[in-house]
Image: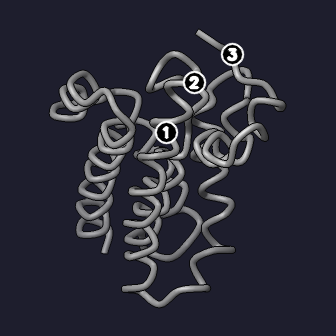
Amino acid sequence: MTQPSPRFLIAHPAHFLALGFGSGLAPRAPGTFGTLAGWLLYPLIRPLFGEWQFLAFLVFGVVLGSFAIGITGRKLGEIDHGSIVWDEIVAIWLVLFFTPAGWLWQLAAFALFRFFDILKPPPVRQCDARLKNGFGVMADDLLAAGYALLVLAILKRILG
């Protein structure tokens, strides 16, 4: 298995995207760094789109990301290499889109998404195990995002 470097990152546009613009090169917890990069980029990207446009942008991010992850994963020798974090970025954007306003809600969204992405409750774990392609890498994070959104909705309902 190849360990990516800054040179690998810029060798192909797919690598740059799949490695989360470099956030996936973090030596420890690259998934957390990718999620953090997504959180930091969200307020810069979100105002550029209306609601439906942003959802279309996310769909485009899933499709483009599936291809970029497939290319990068094959080059690295592992389709779901730890340095591939575009899936975390798109998933946290989805979660933040539906998260109530305020940094505490966003912090909760971040923590819940990371929790479910790491824990991989059913069917996240099954998706991760069965779909060994770029879309599969994206899909398990989207399912983890769904769990995070469910818990956020319950918290919102309880807390008002």
Question: At which x and y percent is residue 107?
Answer: 54, 55
The residue at 34%/27% (across/down) is 119
| Numbered label attached to residue 3 | 3
Q: Secondary structure at mark 2?
A: helix
- Badge 3 crowding class, 10 Å Cα cut-off, few under 14, some 14 to 19, many 20 or more, is few
At 64% from the left and 45% from the top, the residue drawn is: 20
Which of discs 2 and 1 lies nearer the camera? The answer is 2
Q: Position of residue 17 (x, y in %)?
A: 62, 48
* Nearest to viewer (mark 3 / mark 2): 2
Q: Amino acid at mark 3?
A: Gln
Q: Estimate the spatial distance between the alpha carbons at disc 2 and disc 1, rounded to whole Å.
A: 10 Å
Q: Is residue 46 above or below residue 36?
A: below
Q: Residues within 10 Å of mark 1 (few under 14, many from 20)?
A: many
Of residues 91 and 155, the one nearer the viewer is 91
Q: From the image, tell me which residue sits under label 2.
A: 75
Mark 1 lies on a secondary structure that is helix
In percent of width and height, residue 76 lies at 58, 20
Task: Please name the amino acid that badge 2 sits on.
Answer: Lys
Percent x, y for residue 18? Answer: 58, 42
Q: CA distance from mark 3 to mark 2?
A: 10 Å
Specify which label sits upstream in the sequence, 2 or 1: 1
Q: Which residue is mark 1?
A: 69
Instruction: Please say if 24 is above or below 78.
Output: below
Residue found at x 61% / y 58%: 39
* Among the two numbered marks 3 and 1 on one chain, the one whose residue lies closer to the N terminus: 3
Mark toward the start of the polypeptide (3 vs 2): 3
How far is disc 3 from disc 1 in space, using C-alphas?
A: 15 Å
Q: Secondary structure at mark 3?
A: loop
Residue 25 is labelled as none
Taking 101 as reference, is 34 left or right? right
Kindly indicate whether the residue at mark 2 contacts the one at mark 3 (C-beta within 8 angstroms): no
